[in-house]
Image (cartoon, rainbow, N blue to C red):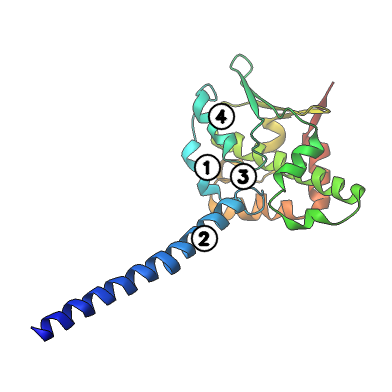
């Protein structure tokens, strides 16, 4: 009987130990990795192309699919509003704020925003927005077959981007969604601020 009690106590202690390991080690590690992954989706250079592949579609007129795509791309903010104009195959995104504020919000998860002069921070925010617009446009045109134009409206400035201008940036746009090609041709280039500035001038057509 004593041996049986010892066995029960031993199994109970082993169960408690296993529960503790799962609850206080494995679960927190999993949550930390999940949080790290989601944080990476906020930036163009760390965004996972596999995160948005489920939104590949032939038609931009599939409203929920198109809107959900942009919600899973960098620069997604709670203030975004959408207009889908099927006659001109255009998606319009209204950010409801000035460009620099959107850039600031999109980088709020980064601690470096606490230092630097106002001019330096504004330059960082503007670069981040333009980097994301290049990235998001590339993703949208690659994933939605009949999308022709995207209009990004901020309170102080608006840009229009066309499919032809985006496709011209890449050697073989048809194969751009390959994970290796995406990293090499899209994301690695966006790590260069000079590239971002030059391409932004080339593809972001400012609207009145």
Residue 173: x and y, percent?
A: 61, 41
Left or right relative to 147: residue 115: right
Which residue appears farthest toward the left when viewing the image? 1
The residue at 64%/55% (across/down) is 184
Q: Disc 4 designates what residue?
A: 67
Q: Disc 3 designates what residue?
A: 172
Q: CA distance from mark 1 to mark 2?
A: 19 Å
Q: How many marks?
A: 4
Q: CA distance from mark 1 to mark 4?
A: 12 Å
Do labels 2 and 4 touch, CB within 8 Å?
no
Do labels 3 and 1 touch, CB within 8 Å?
no
Residue 63: x and y, percent?
A: 52, 23
Q: Residue 83: name its quadrant.
A: top right
Q: What is the crowding at mark 4: few (fewer than 14 residues within 10 Å), some, or many (at least 20)?
A: some
Q: Which mark is residue 33?
A: 2
Left or right relative to 111: residue 48: left
Q: Quadrant of the N terminus?
A: bottom left
Left or right relative to 127: residue 37: left
Q: Secondary structure at mark 3?
A: loop
- Give the mark toward the camera: 2 or 3: 2
The residue at 40%/64% (across/down) is 23
- If you read the primary sequence from the N terminus, does the residue marked by circle 3 or circle 1 appear first? 1
Q: Quadrant of the C terminus?
A: top right
Left or right relative to 181: residue 102: right
Residue 177: x and y, percent?
A: 55, 46
* 54 and 23: which is toward the camera: 23
Q: Secondary structure at mark 1?
A: loop
Q: Secondary structure at mark 4?
A: helix
Q: Disc 1 designates what residue?
A: 52
Q: CA distance from mark 2 to mark 4?
A: 27 Å
Q: CA distance from mark 3 to mark 1?
A: 20 Å
């Amino acid at each position: 009987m004593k041996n049986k009690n010892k066995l029960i106590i031993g199994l109970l202690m082993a169960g408690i130990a296993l529960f503790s390991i799962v609850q206080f080690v494995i679960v927190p590690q999993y949550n930390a990795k999940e949080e790290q992954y989601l944080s990476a989706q906020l930036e163009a250079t760390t965004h996972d192309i596999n995160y948005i592949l489920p939104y590949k579609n032939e038609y931009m007129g599939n409203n929920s699919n198109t809107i959900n795509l942009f919600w899973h791309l960098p620069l997604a903010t709670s203030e975004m509003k959408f207009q889908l104009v099927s006659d001109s195959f255009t998606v319009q995104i209204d950010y409801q704020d000035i460009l620099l504020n959107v850039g600031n919000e999109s980088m709020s998860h980064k601690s470096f925003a606490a230092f630097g002069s106002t001019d330096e921070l504004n330059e960082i925010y503007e670069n981040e927005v333009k980097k994301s617009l290049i990235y998001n446009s590339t993703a949208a045109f690659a994933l939605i077959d009949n999308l022709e134009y995207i209009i990004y409206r901020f309170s102080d400035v608006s840009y229009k981007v066309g499919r032809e201008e985006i496709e011209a940036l890449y050697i073989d746009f048809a194969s751009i969604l390959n994970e290796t090609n995406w990293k090499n041709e899209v994301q690695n280039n966006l790590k260069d601020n000079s590239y971002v500035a030059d391409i932004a001038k080339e593809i972001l057509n400012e609207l009145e």
